[in-house]
Image: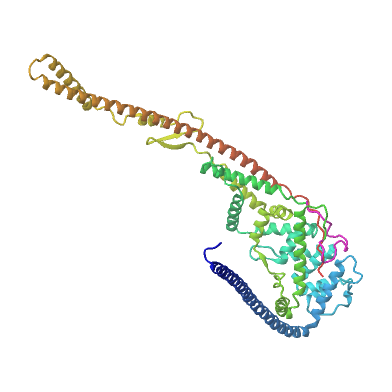
Amino acid sequence: MTDHPFSTWTQESDHAQSQRLHALSWDVERLRASLSSQHRAASAMRSDLASLRGSIETRLTRLTEAFDAFVELSSLRDQLSLVAGPALVRQATRARLVALGTPSAPTGPVLDVAGAPAAPGYWLADALAVLGPDDDGAAQRAASIDLRRTATFLTVAGAACGRADLVARWSADALGTIDVARPVTRAQRAVWVAAAEGRLGADARATLLDRLRAAVAAVPAATVQETVDDWAAHVQGDVRDPRADGTGTLEVARVRRAAAALVTLRELVESGAPGTGAGTPADAPADAPADAGTDAGTDAGSDVTAQDDADATVAELVAVLRALVDEGAEEERDLMVRAAELEAVVTGTGAPGPAWDAPAGDLLTLLRQDALDRRDDVGALVRDACAPWLAAVADRLLADATVPAPEDLEAAAAGVTLRARPRQTVVEGREEALRRITAPVHPLTPREKQVTIGCALAAVLLWVATAVDPSDLGWLYGTAAVAFSVAAGVRASRRAARSRADAERAERGAAFVEREAQRLQARVEEVAQAFARSGSDARDAHARVVGLLAAPPSPTGTPAAPAPAPR
């Protein structure tokens, strides 16, 4: 029972008010959550709008560029239509290559080359006729118009079509002139690699080797010296630092590095011997390669790395052939280049690749990369061609690895120069260092000795005087005796402490000198042995390298399958 009849009113009113406050708080929380959700949605919408705006602007810019390119491309095509003959020749060439490079194409076009359109003055028209029915004069007519293009086309297309006679006839002209005065073109490099791998037959490989040897022999002496230095540095750059284990000195590191570089050079010369190429001969039947989208000469059990290299070689040959065909006749060549650029803009694809005769690198750089970095048929052939340079590199490394070992090594100890020589047990300067290090720092001087003895004698005399003198002066004698006794004792104890310190220092110094002498003797013996081992390894590796470089060339490798023709 409550004390007041209306007390429940107050309690009920407080409870209802609390409920209303709780409900209001819940509404406020829901409103805050709703506002927060709306804020996030608004932020997301603003982000989407910004992204959409950027996307729309990008697309609009892209469409504008594509439209402008399409308009210009239409104008160019109108101009190119005035020289329809070369365009029809190119179409016939593509169709003919696809037909010859495909085993069977029941639904594909098979063009009668004899009915190819005429294009007077266009080398490709006559070169195409070579791939069709017999035309004895077609090849010579094409070569008289443009020898480089005709030779490159017939070499690559002949390999793709199984025409070994064309490859053998035109591969030498396709290789062209190789010397340091001019860069190697993309087509030359593609034929170079294919010939080195045996893909173009034994004659093409022998021609490449002869031309590379001639190019190497024609390099000026000053350039040869720079090349040998560069190659030696390149070979040594692949060798791990012999001081990485912390046991070698600078001199030992130099000879070990040179010896290790010679071993690396020996392994390089031994690797990638010619004759390891796999595949079918260059004169394989025309149906040997698959269609344009497949790689020829693929063996399911072949090595993956070798197959990747073969695929890259085939792809580059196809790309060179495509660039050569798509180049156009002389009067339309500039327009064709611009049209290819505009087509890339319209279609959104990448820019067209380099031209078939674009520089692929200078001769010296390509020789260094092939000779020192490739362990395949290409590297083996280039190392064969660069044998004089590699022999000079081996001589340089041998000279660095067989320098005489130092006659002695020196080290300082106690201000004395210690000198150790191999196969000697006595280290020069050791006795002098021991004498210096064991010499006392605080020697006993005559004056100090005299003063100490004088204090001791005075103390003795005063003690005697104190004992025998009965006068009142006895206390004076006793006091003086005590003073002189203390002085003599202090000086004697100080002298003893200094002597002990000198003895301990001399012992530590003698141990230090002995350790330094032993360490120096061990070090000179280690250096001598390291020089001897490195020299022996270097001479063995050098003899092997020189022997391999001087050996007659190995038989040429079995040529690989020809490249497939592009569609």
Q: Residue at x 14, y 15 (%)?
A: 467
Badge count: 0
* Quadrant housing the N terminus: bottom right
Describe residue 444's horizontal placement relative to residue 551 as left or right: left
Instruction: Please state the horizontal and vertical placement of residue 531, each as a whole percent of the image.
Output: 56, 39
The image's colouring method is rainbow
Q: Is residue 547 above or below residue 416?
A: below
Given residues 45 and 522, the one toward you in this image is: 45
Image point (53%, 35%), residue name: 526
Dividing the picture into quadrants, the one containing residue 62 is bottom right
Look at the image and tell me in which quarter the C terminus lies: bottom right
Quick one: which residue is furthest to the top in this view?
Answer: 468
Q: Magenta stretch: give its range.
A: 276-295
Identified at 72% across, 65% down, the residue is 188
Quadrant housing residue 227: bottom right
Assess whether residue 293 is covered by the magenta stretch.
yes
